[in-house]
Image (tube, rainbow, N blue to C red):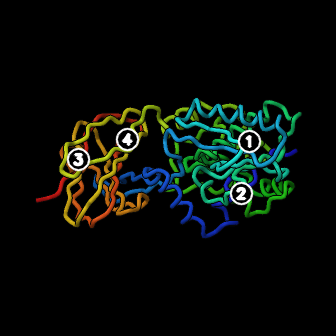
Amino acid sequence: MAHTCKICSPYVSELRKGDEAASDEAASLERVDNVRVTPIRVGGLRASAAVEKLKLWENSRTIRVRFLDGLPEVQAKVRDIAKEWESLANLTLEFVDTGRAEIRISFEEKGFSWSTVGTDALTVGSSEATMNYGWLEPDTSQREYERVVRHEFGHALGMIHEHQNPAALGKIPWDRPKVYAYYAQQGWDEDDVDFNIFQVYDEDSTNHTTFDPTSIMQYAVPDALTVGSFAIGWNTTFSPTDADFMRRQYPKNAPAMTELTVGGPRVTADLASAGEVDAYHFSVPQAATFIMTTEGPTDTVLTLHGPNDRGAVLAWDDDRGRGRNARIVRKLQAGEYWLTVRHKQAASTGSYSVGVKKRN
């Protein structure tokens, strides 16, 4: 059976145009820092910001998983390999036999294996599959089980195909006519190939590292499909970059969302791991102008979300506070608001404090 991975996230493909809004809403309701701001500087001056729209689950969450069909011995192999992700991400995969489940696995679509990406699973009807394994049988090799299950659960936890990483642009010398012909033999049309192979994600739609050809999320690239001599084999194990990346997205011992009291004491915190984003919530009982600040030695980026919508970016700041700190002054209407704090440099850590007060 061909090792095909047919449209691993059908709910963001051309098959479901118009569902992007539902996808973004599900992600922002799950986790406020699924919308992240990164300042862009031109000539040393603040010019604008890039907004990353992620599909990560709430950190430390228990995600329920249920099989819709399949042989018990195949299910057991899938379950055992899927649980390996718990050692990399601060998540629990709880396999249930009945009732609600965020991830629902089928084996019915033969010849194709795919998964929705992260919180896109929440946009799928409760009786429908969010993941499919189309060629796993009792006698399938253990190596192939490991390759495909690790890959599809990577998608389910929010990872994209590595060759569609924005940093992969131009890194693989594809021979496009040969790629189209190769995948046509597996039932793909040119639109399928463009979506699954050639199209990279926008810089502002995903968190990403440098291109990692050893990632479990990387398709094999046969030498026959490239110009010159270039090939990538079928990866079956987690790469060091996979492990580091997912630990940053789902850090252990990360604080839960903290409540801020307007005019109350400042909250002291640490960005203890690279890529960490801390989230805070506060309420505004009536319209007024508020001052939101970070203080301390760390170069922070402060983002204000709301009102009453965790996915809406209302304002952000990089360095209008003291030193390298952030400061937002904004008139706010009555409602619920959230602040997120991240380090300006994704790989850096540091301590800070955050507070909100009403301007006199």
Element type where label 2 sits in the image: loop
Q: Which of disc 3 and disc 1 is earlier in sequence? A: 1
Q: Which amino acid does label 4 sit on?
A: Gln
Residue at image coords 80%, 47% = 69
Label 1 sits on residue: 220
Q: How far apart are marks 2 and 3 (CA)?
A: 44 Å
Q: Residues within 10 Å of mark 1 (few under 14, many from 20)?
A: some
Q: Which of disc 1 and disc 4 is earlier in sequence? A: 1
Q: Residue 127 carries which label?
A: 2
Residue at image coords 53%, 47% = 56
Q: In this view, does 324 lie to the left or right of 190?
A: left
Q: Residue 345 carries which label?
A: 4
Pointer 4 with pointer 2, Cβ within 8 A = no
Element type where label 3 sits in the image: strand
Q: Is residue 285 left or right of residue 74?
A: left
Q: What residue type is labelled 2?
A: Ser
Q: Which of disc 1 and disc 2 is earlier in sequence? A: 2
Q: Which mark is residue 355?
A: 3
Q: Position of residue 215 (x, y in %)?
A: 64, 37
Pointer 2 with pointer 1, Cβ within 8 A = no
Pointer 1 with pointer 3, Cβ within 8 A = no
Residue at image coords 56%, 60% = 23
Q: Which of disc 4 and disc 3 is earlier in sequence? A: 4
Q: Which label sits in the foreground, 1 or 3? A: 3
Q: Relative to 334, say whether 254 is above or below.
A: above
Q: Which amino acid does label 3 sit on?
A: Gly
Q: Which label sits in the foreground, 4 or 2? A: 2
Residue at image coords 64%, 50% = 100
Q: Position of residue 276 (x, y in %)?
A: 41, 39
Q: Position of residue 247 (x, y in %)?
A: 51, 34
Q: How far apart are marks 1 and 3 (CA)?
A: 49 Å
Element type where label 4 sits in the image: loop
